[in-house]
């Protein structure tokens, strides 16, 4: 049986722990050098996962922007783009979202959902997509088992807060890249990096700091959340 993929969580936060503000346009917490770092991480991934809330709020494309990196993927026998993955309990996804772009019949975007969500999505989606019902509730361990069985060895998780919380609370993350932008949001209604949860080991558990990198005015911290 295939093992679960290596799970990398990637997020950009303000100094006070927010991932966005409440304005209509997305708050850019990072800078061009860090965007290029993230693009390189995407190029080394087999799949990129975001939650349905991120699809609705940010309408991301989740592509590898660098042509050289895409060419290198194809030369290595990989698809031009990593496979797109999203998670939704209720099946509330816009069929016209940019998330569906660049999907192919051979590698369509994957949607993990509940039995109820699967029925709803079957009536809504028009773009190529593969819908996987995980049961009456979302089970992220089962999600990783399914991805592993599909040959996904490296999964990059880009949010949002509920998704990052689920992976960290479930002890399912192998690495965390935390890019800290030099801004303060301070809005209690804005989305935060993590939600309240019971995390493995509690508040006394210390993650292992693997690396600190400065990219202009952004600091990137690389952590190993669990003991190796």
Image (tube, rainbow, N blue to C red):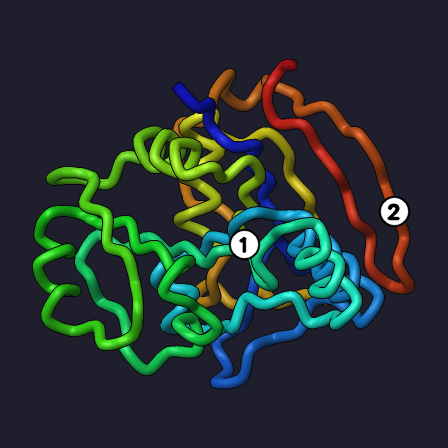
Q: Earlier in the sequence, mark 2 or mark 1?
A: 1
Look at the image and tell me in which quarter the N terminus lies: top left
Residue 123 in the image: state x and y as whole percent.
10, 70
Examine the rendering and report whether any part of residue 21 can be seen: yes
Q: Pinpoint residue 119: horizontal percent, then vertical percent.
A: 8, 58
Crowding at dot 1, Cα within 10 Å, few <14 / some 14-19 / many 20+, comes out as many
Residue 94 percent across, percent down from the top left = 28, 76
Which residue bears the numbered disc 2?
213
Helix, strand or loop at label 1? It is loop
Of tags 2 and 1, which is closer to the observer?
A: 1
Q: Position of residue 216 (x, y in %)?
A: 91, 63
Q: Look at mark 1 in the image and give the residue it sits on.
A: 158
Is residue 160 in view from this perspective? no
Evaluate if marks 2 and 1 touch, with contact meaning CB atoms under 8 Å apart.
no
Foreground residue, 174 or 128? 128
Vertical side of 107 occupied by 183: above or below: below
**Which residue is at the front of the view, 6 or 16?**
6
Direction from residue 101 to residue 72 in the image, left or right: right
Q: Is the residue 113 above or below the residue 189 in the image?
A: above
* Residue drawn 51% across the image and 32% down it: 5
Tell me if mark 2 has few (under 14), some (14-19) or many (20+) residues whose alpha carbon lies within 10 angstroms of its own. Answer: few
- The Cα–Cα distance between marks 2 and 1, rounded to whole angstroms, is 19 Å
- Quarter in which the C terminus is drawn: top right
Residue 64 is tagged as: none
> Which residue is located at x 75 percent, y 38 percent?
222
At 77% from the left and 42% from the top, the residue drawn is: 221
Question: How many badges with numbers are in the image?
Answer: 2
Task: Name the residue nearer the viewer: 137 or 19.
Answer: 137
**Element type at marker 2?**
strand
Q: Residue at x 43, y 65 (%)?
A: 54
């Amino acid at each position: 049986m295939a093992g679960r993929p290596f799970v990398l969580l990637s997020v950009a936060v303000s100094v006070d722990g927010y991932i966005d503000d409440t304005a209509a346009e997305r708050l850019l917490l990072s800078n061009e050098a860090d965007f290029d770092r993230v693009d390189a991480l995407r190029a080394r991934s087999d799949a990129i996962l975001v939650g349905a809330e991120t699809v609705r709020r940010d309408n991301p494309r989740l592509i590898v922007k660098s042509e050289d990196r895409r060419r290198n993927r194809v030369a290595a026998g990989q698809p031009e783009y990593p496979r797109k993955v999203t998670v939704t309990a209720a099946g509330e996804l816009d069929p016209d979202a940019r998330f569906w772009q660049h999907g192919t019949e051979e590698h369509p975007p994957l949607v993990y959902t509940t039995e109820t969500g699967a029925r709803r999505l079957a009536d809504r989606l028009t773009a190529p997509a593969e819908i996987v019902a995980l049961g009456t509730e979302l089970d992220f361990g089962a999600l990783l088992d399914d991805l592993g069985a599909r040959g996904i060895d490296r999964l990059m998780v880009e949010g949002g807060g509920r998704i990052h919380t689920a992976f960290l609370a479930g002890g399912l993350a192998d690495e965390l890249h935390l890019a800290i932008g030099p801004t303060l949001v301070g809005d209690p209604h804005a989305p935060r990096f993590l939600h309240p949860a019971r995390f493995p080991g509690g508040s006394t558990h210390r993650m292992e700091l693997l690396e600190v990198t400065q990219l202009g005015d952004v600091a990137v911290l690389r952590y190993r959340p669990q003991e190796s």
